[in-house]
Amino acid sequence: MKNREVFTESGKPEPKEITEKRDEDARQQRVEKMPRPPELERFLENFEFRILKDIFAHKMKRVGIDSMEINVITPERIAPRPPISSPSSYDPRENILSISWDDTVSEFRKYPNLNHQMLMGSVLCHEETHAVSHNECQGLAPNAKTVSSQSGYRRFTTTKGAGENRTKSEGAFRNFDEAVTEKLGFEVFQEYVTATGAISQREIKEFSDLREKDPSITPYANDMRVLDALIARISYETGVKGSDVWHAIIRGKFEGEDFSDPELRQLFADTLGPEVLEMLENSVPSTQLLDTLKLPPDTKMEKAKKKLFAWFQPLLLKVSKRAKYNTL
């Protein structure tokens, strides 16, 4: 299974040589002709991309994916990023990851003593998580009228037309996908620095605690709160452990789960209410989603009842077979 695929506008697989030429042209323009600053160069020279790939392979196996090409982006496809809206990005159309050393460090200027290698590592792992997600592009030829792309859960479509409004762009599930990427990417980062010993355990813990204490240094902090609330609500409604819900979400990101499927949308509506998936799709403000996803007020009591019954049931069965029919 490939985690990056390119199709023609008609939906047929694009010839391999065309994709390879476009990718090489992008590499020449964005990497070869734009030298990376020395700090970024040294960081990439010392980064263990083989270990990162092994960690992603382990993550995939943990969620039930045994075989997939893992599109970890190595230095020959990592470009310096100009000072624009965000310090880093991954573009599935060109298969290029770009990152700005100065902008990344600047994002944490309130904490000047933080290890810069650690900051760069966490940002790189975020973008690499985008790259190893299911990425699909369609209609990249210059004469195509509709260009669409998917990266993980996020979908984006641009329709080219004539006249004043010659292009129209529509996106879906952006904030949800970024939250999943940040949560999973930070897990990968923690496993990477533990495996390599590149950062001390004390620094890792301090950085992790700081992210919890000061959400302003995590660009998707509010979206991650929504993700955690969604996991908790699905777990509550289905009785499935939160960790298993999270693993299912990870698998959906790697495989490119299609939320436009009518059966899946109906399942979401029946379980969480008709508006939740639409709110995630349109990236409504996190406060609205958190209010919609909050657990019923008696959640703790119901959980306590279930745990108590689970513990007490074996004893009850010794005196009454009816105990196994209790569905608390």
Image (tube, helix red, strand yellow):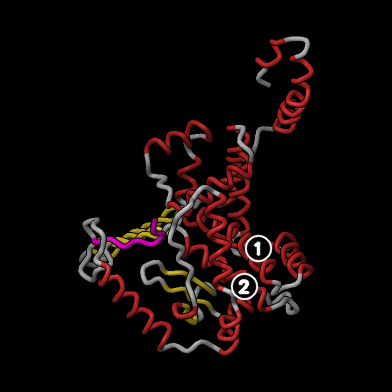
Return the x and y of residue 129 as percentages of the image width and height.
52, 63
Q: 116 or 58, which lies in front?
A: 58
Report whether residue 45 is seen. yes
Crowding at dot 1, Cα within 10 Å, few <14 / some 14-19 / many 20+, comes out as: some
314 vs 245, left or right, is right
In the picture shown, does residue 237 fall above or below 78? above
In the picture shown, does residue 58 fall above or below 26? above
Q: Are marks 2 and 1 in contact (CB under 8 Å)?
A: no
For residue 82, the mark is none
SS under mark 2: helix
In the picture shown, does residue 178 fall above or below 262? below
Image point (53%, 59%), residue name: 57
Tag 1 or tag 2, which sits nearer the N-term?
A: 2
Q: Amino acid at mark 1?
A: Glu
Crowding at dot 2, Cα within 10 Å, few <14 / some 14-19 / many 20+, comes out as: many
Image point (62%, 62%), residue name: 186
Q: Amino acid at mark 2?
A: Gly
Q: 174 or 324, which lies in front?
A: 324
For residue 121, the mark is 2
Report whether residue 169 is seen. no
Return the x and y of residue 167 as percentages of the image width and height.
29, 65
The image quadrant that residue 292 belongs to is top right
Return the x and y of residue 73 as percentages of the image width and height.
47, 72
Which residue was labeled with disc 1?
A: 191
13 vs 69, left or right, is left
Q: The C terminus appears in which quarter of the rendering? A: top right
Q: Which residues are magenta?
A: 1-8
